[in-house]
């Protein structure tokens, strides 16, 4: 059975959007550090793929890669999926309660009423406009900060949507070393989609590949707030090595296990 390897793509979205580059704002990790991967926690990860072959030279097993993108400094992906919607509803309820209290107080000066209405608008927060390119989880929701509180459009700290890998290409794909594709999954942490690839571990060498990643920037257009897609790229690589399939007990070739001598 192929071994499952995971590559975490952690992006500092705010700084990446500001600099329009992923190079210094992406941190890559995999679970092969003890097996030879280099550049853990940097944008220069080289993932070790330790292939193996049988005694006749045929490939013993393939490897499977899974890429998992996350946003640094955003609401954790492990919170319930309805969290953003629920926080938006709570802010609406709070704003309505404030309006009821304002009406119940009775007449007041125009300045006081305007100030109170402005405060209520801040309490209600800013709702994202639904667009064709942002349909789904990001549509018609409110902007939250990293603590889950509703914020206004002039706030500085947003909880950015998770990065989205839209394509994986480059030398490793062109040379048919790996075969990436996007798959559907019941895993709600990845919103039901993730990128995976089968790797041909029978061809040793170092092969580069490129990920195209879509971030989302909060912008104002025609008086409405929306998430604008921004596409950037980041490079990584695979280092493939092969060695004979060995018996874990004897450290030799596959065969019969040794029988210990009987004790008298």
Image (spheres, rainbow, N blue to C red):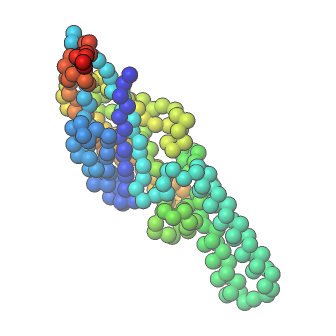
Which residue occupies 29% across, 18% down?
60
Which of the 4 quarters of the picture holds residue 35? Answer: top left
Q: Which of 188 and 144 is in front in this view?
A: 188
- Count of residue discs: 0
User: Quick check: 58 above or below 28?
Assistant: above
Q: Which of 36 and 95 is in front in this view?
A: 36
Q: Is residue 82 visible?
A: yes
Percent coordinates x, y for residue 32 in the rendering: 28, 38
The answer to whether 139 appears left or right of 92 in the picture is: left
Which of the 4 quarters of the picture holds residue 115? Answer: bottom right
User: Quick check: 206 above or below 221?
Assistant: above
Q: Is residue 168 visible?
A: no
Which residue occupies 81% across, 81% down?
104
Which residue occupies 68% across, 87% down?
112
Which residue occupies 24% across, 18% down?
264
Percent coordinates x, y for residue 132 in the rendering: 57, 44
User: Quick check: 156 above or below 256?
Assistant: below
Residue found farthest to the front: 264
Percent coordinates x, y for residue 103 in the rendering: 79, 79
The answer to whether 15 appears left or right of 250 in the picture is: right
Percent coordinates x, y for residue 247 in the rendering: 25, 21
- Quarter of the image with the N terminus is top left
Residue found farthest to the top: 56
Q: Nearer the viewer, residue 213 or 91?
A: 91
Residue found farthest to the bottom: 109
């Amino acid at each position: 059975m192929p071994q499952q390897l995971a590559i975490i793509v952690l992006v500092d979205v705010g700084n990446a959007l500001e600099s329009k580059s992923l190079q210094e704002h992406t941190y890559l990790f995999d679970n092969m550090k003890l097996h030879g991967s280099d550049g853990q926690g940097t944008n220069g990860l080289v993932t070790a793929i330790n292939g193996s072959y049988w005694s006749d030279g045929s490939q013993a097993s393939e490897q499977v890669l899974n890429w998992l993108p996350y946003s640094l400094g955003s609401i954790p992906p492990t919170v319930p999926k309805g969290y953003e919607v629920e926080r938006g509803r709570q802010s609406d309820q709070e704003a309505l309660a404030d309006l009821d209290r304002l009406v119940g107080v009775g007449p007041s000066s125009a300045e006081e009423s305007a100030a109170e209405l402005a405060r209520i608008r801040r309490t209600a927060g800013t709702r994202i406009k639904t667009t064709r390119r942002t349909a789904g989880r990001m549509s018609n929701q409110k902007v939250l900060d990293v603590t889950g509180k509703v914020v206004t459009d002039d706030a500085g700290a947003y909880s950015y949507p998770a990065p989205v890998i839209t394509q994986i290409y480059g030398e490793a794909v062109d040379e048919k070393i790996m075969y990436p594709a996007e798959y559907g999954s019941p895993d709600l942490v990845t919103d039901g989609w993730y990128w995976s690839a089968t790797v041909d571990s029978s061809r040793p060498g170092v092969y580069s590949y490129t990920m195209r990643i879509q971030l989302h920037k909060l912008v104002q257009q025609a008086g409405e707030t929306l998430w604008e897609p921004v596409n950037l790229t980041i490079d990584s690589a695979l280092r493939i090595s092969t060695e004979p399939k060995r018996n874990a007990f004897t450290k030799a070739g596959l065969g019969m296990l040794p029988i210990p001598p009987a004790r008298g």
